Amino acid sequence: MKEFTPVDIQVQNDQHLVAITWADGHISRLPITRLRGYCPCAECQGHQRIVRFHENRVQTISGADLVGRYAVSFRFSDNHALGIFRFDILRKLDQSEELRWGVPEESLVSGRAEHV
Ligand SMILES: [Zn+2]
């Protein structure tokens, strides 16, 4: 699954994005506002099989940690740090590939995104 395997992850706060280079060569540039808005934690998304975007003004990240070999957790500038962003979720948040994955409201619905 090269498309879900990052080889480089860079938080670029000056550009308000996270740049991820994937093993298939694609580079995703994910606006931090988009990441924060689609934070997958239960506090943000509830426990239903629905994914929603939450409007926000968060444009920087103060910390990022790998979670095992499958995910990254970000600490956003509003101090929210509960979200575990699986690599497949990060890839599917790439708006430049929306034709490939569909919109996050469809592609990230729990149960569908778990097969990686
Ligand atoms: Zn959250």
Image (cartoon, helix red, strand yellow):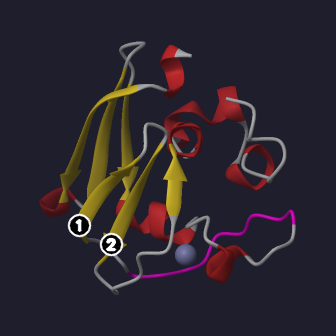
Estimate how packed mark 1 is, as few (under 14), some (14 to 19) or many (20 or more) residues with alpha carbons within 10 Å.
Answer: few
For the residue labelled by badge 2, is the local secondary structure a helix, a strand or a loop? strand
* CB contact under 8 Å: marks 2 and 1: yes
Q: Which residue is drawn at 38% across and 57% down?
A: 31
Estimate how packed mark 2 is, as few (under 14), some (14 to 19) or many (20 or more) residues with alpha carbons within 10 Å.
Answer: some
Q: Which residue is drawn at 33% across and 72% down?
A: 75
Residue type for callout 2:
Arg
Give the distance between the C-alpha atoms of the residues marked 2 and 1, in whole angstroms.
Answer: 5 Å
Q: Which residue is drawn at 61% across and 64% down?
A: 40
Residue bearing mark 2: 75
Instruction: Report if residue 53 lies within the magenta region.
Output: yes
In-front residue for pair 86/94: 86
Q: Residue at x 53, y 43 (%)?
A: 95
Tag of residue 63 = 1
Residue type for callout 1:
Gly
Name the image quarter holding residue 6: top left
The location of residue 71, given as percent across then percent down, is 47, 46
Task: Please say if 96 is above or below 37.
Answer: above
Tell me the magenta residue range.
Answer: 49-57
The location of residue 62, given as percent across then percent down, is 21, 72
Q: Which residue lies furthest to the left in this view?
A: 14
Q: Residue furthest front?
A: 68
Q: Quadrant of ligand 1?
A: bottom right
Task: Please say if 73 is above or below 90.
Answer: below
Viewed as shown, does residue 71 lie left or right of 29? Answer: right
The location of residue 74, given as percent across then percent down, is 36, 64
Instruction: Report if residue 47 lies within the magenta region.
Output: no
